[in-house]
Amino acid sequence: MSTTDPFEILFVCAGNTSRSPFAAACAREELAKLDGGGWRVVSAGTTVSDESGPTDEARRLAAEFGLDLGSHRPRTVTAEDCRRADLIIAIGWDQASHVWSLVPDSWDRCFTLKEFVHYARRAPSRPAILYAGTADRMRDRVKAAHELRRRARSDHGFWGDLRPQDFDIPEPDAVHPDGWRTFARVMRLLVIDAMRLVVGPRPDPRSDAPKKKAARTRKAAHARPRSARRAT
């Protein structure tokens, strides 16, 4: 992938009928607020059995948050999906393991959702001026999160500084609406955090205000007639 390609995020769950399409819809909404373009969000599943569409629960929950899953069709994740993605967010540990077995060299770009938020939150920020564009900056944020994970595993063992139970976001077993609403709130907040972390801090236009004012002053001074400048 080149630095001019859009930054692609792949969400992966098991059936691709509820968790990953809901997470992808939340991500698109948040990224549209944070940055106008330069990214692509898709989702897929590891054990897709129903290709007709999202579950009724997922549709209903998405609608409650103003999201539309009507056009989504479940599909099985492929090795090409994993190779193309700049960031692969697995909803659970089983899906992350599946991705790594499918494409072993995807390890540095594949995290569970909770895992990515944990490490990206601690990753140092670098000035936006260092990057060619948003996608370039987002790729660097993924590298920084992976480097922290790599160090944590070197220091603490396979699970790093997390516990195994910290990796998954289980799908509710019951059809009770409260269980699904709790799941949706947790998922949405985590996805919003992840998108804000991968985009990184935006440049503060106020920080350039003094420089721009000084530049305008110099330009105005040079624009005055020579005689007027001597008089001052």
Image (cartoon, rainbow, N blue to C red):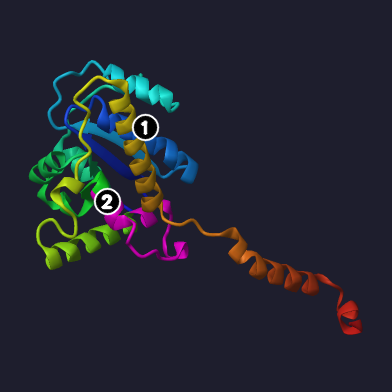
Instruction: Specify the label residue 77 is tagged with.
Output: none
Position of 210 compared to 35: left or right? right
Q: Secondary structure at mark 1?
A: helix
Position of 202 compared to 161: left or right? right
Dot 2 crowding, Cα within 10 Å, few <14, some 14–19, many 20+: many
Q: Residue furthest left?
A: 101
Q: Which one is nearer the viewer's eye here, 77 or 172?
A: 172
Q: Which one is nearer the viewer's eye here, 197 or 118?
A: 118
Between marks 1 and 2, how big is the CA–CA gap? Answer: 18 Å
Q: Which one is nearer the viewer's eye here, 210 or 59?
A: 59
Q: Which residue is mark 2?
A: 116
Q: Is residue 118 magenta?
A: yes
Ranked by sequence position, the earlier of labels 1 and 2 is: 1
Kind of residue indicated by mark 1: Ala
Q: Position of residue 189 (x, y in %)?
A: 37, 41
Q: Nearer the viewer, mark 1 or mark 2?
A: 2
Instruction: Specify the label residue 25 is tagged with.
Output: 1
For the C terminus, the quadrant is bottom right
Q: Which residue is depicted at the point 20% across and 48% down?
A: 166
Q: Position of residue 105 (x, y in %)?
A: 13, 52
Residue 218 lies, with reference to residue 138, above or below; the image says below
Q: Which one is nearer the viewer's eye here, 225 or 151?
A: 151
Q: Is residue 73 visible?
A: yes
**Magenta residues (range):** 115-138
